[in-house]
Amino acid sequence: MANLGLEFKDLSTILADMVSLATGTAISDPINTSEFVSVAQIGLKTGYDPLMTAINQVLSKTIFSVRPYNRKLKVLEADQLRYGNHVRKINYLDKPFEKNKMFDLVDGESIDPWVVNKPSVVQTNIYGQVTYAKNSTIYLDQLDNAMQGPDQFASFVAGQMQNRSDMIEQAHETTARNTVANMIGGKIHLTQYIDLLAEYKAATGIELTAATVYVPDNFVGFAKWFSGYVKTLSELMTERSELFHQNFTAGTIMRHTPKDRQKALIYTGHLNTTDATALSSVFNDEYMKLVENEPINFWQSIVSPTEISVKAGVTKADGTPEEATVNHKHVLGVIFDDEAMGYTVVNERSLTSPVNNIGGYYNVTDSFQDRYWNDYSENCVVLTLGEPEA
C-alpha cells in the first residue's frame, strides 16, 4: 500500500505525537527503527482506548490537511468568515440625484438642511446545508501490527488516511458540483443566459448547431470569436449595471465585478479541442491570470458532460422561492462574481467509539457540514450552445 510519500522522519513525528497524547508525557521523535518500536510499545501499554483516541486526533488533523485526491471546483470554496457575509446581506439601492438648491437661493427664504432621505435597501437571506458522516472500522489486530515497525506503521497510516480523505474530498466536490448545477439551472430558468450560437450568427451571419460547431472547418472561426466574446463579457461585468443578475420588484440593485473578483468555469472538452486545433493562444495567459478559473470535465454526469438536468431552487423577482425543472444538453461555461455562489465547510469532526470487546474493533466517524449558497442578485453569466429543452 502507498505510504502517501511519508518518510521515516514524518512517521516518527506522527508516532511521537500520538504516544504523547495517549500518555500525557512529551515523547521525542524516534531517530531509528529500534527507538521507533520502543515508542510504539509505550503507546500500546497505555491501552487501546487512549491510544486509539490519540491516533484519531493526530490522523484526523492530517486527513483534513493532506489530501491525495484533490477535489474539483476548488474555486467555489469560501472560508467561514466570507460565508458569514452571505447569510444575511443588506443590498443598498440607487436613488436618483436631487436638484442642487444652491443655485436657487431666494432672499428672505431658507433651505431646510434636515430633509429626511432614507436609504432604500433589499435584504437577502442565503441558506442551505448538506451534512456528511462516514464510519470506518479499525480492528485491534491492525493496531497491534502497526506498532511492529516503521513499514507496518506506514501502511496503517496510509490505509487510514487515503481512503477516508478521498471520500471527504469527493463529498466536498459533490456539494460544489450541485451548487454550480443549481445556479446554472436557475439562470436558464430566469432566461439570464447567453446562447452563443445565436450571438455568433448575429455577429457573423454563420448559423451553426451544437453538433456542427465542432466540425473542423467551423470550429476555428467560432473558437476565435468565442475567445474575444468571453473577454468582452468579462470587461462588461466590471461596469456598474443591472445586466448580469436578478433584480427585485422592491428595487434595482446595481452590481459590478472587478477582474480579481471574477471566476470562470469552462468545459474542458471545448478547451481541449481548442488546444488540438492549435488555437491555445486564443485563451491567452493575460486573461487567465486576471480571472480565477478552472476547467470542468462535466457539470453533473461524467457520461453526459455538457448536460444540466436539475430541479433548481430559484429566487423570483418578488423575493419568494420557487422550484424549476431545467434541462439543457449543451452548457459551455459560466463566469460569475465570487459572491454569486460557493460553499464552506463547518464542524469538521473525527470521533472514535469505545472498543467493541467482542468484535475487537473500533469505529471512527468523520462528519462535517457543507454550507452552500446561490445568490441570483450577484453577477453571473451562463454560456450555452443553443436553447434549453422545452
Image (tube, rainbow, N blue to C red):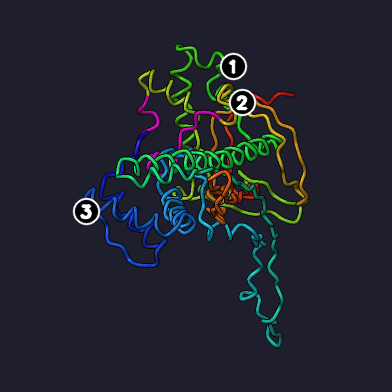
Residue 247 image offset from top left, x and y in percent: 69, 49
For badge 2, the amino acid type reads: Glu
Would you place residue 190 above or below residue 109 in this image?
above
Which residue is label 3 attached to?
31
Please provide percent x and percent y for residue 187.
66, 38
- Where, quadrant-wise, is the C terminus in this rendering? top right
The answer to whether residue 322 is left or right of residue 221 is right
> Residue 325 has which mark?
none
Q: Earlier in the sequence, mark 2 or mark 3?
A: 3
Magenta-colored span: 280-298
Residue 82 in percent (x, y) is at: 53, 58
Residue that badge 2 annotates: 307
Q: Which mark is on residue 209?
A: 1
Q: Which residue is at a point 65% across and 62% down the rendered structure image?
A: 90
Q: CA distance from mark 3 to mark 1?
A: 66 Å
Q: Nearer the viewer, mark 2 or mark 3?
A: 3
Give the class, few, some or many, for how many residues have Cα within 10 Å of label 2's Cα (few <14, many ≥20). Answer: some
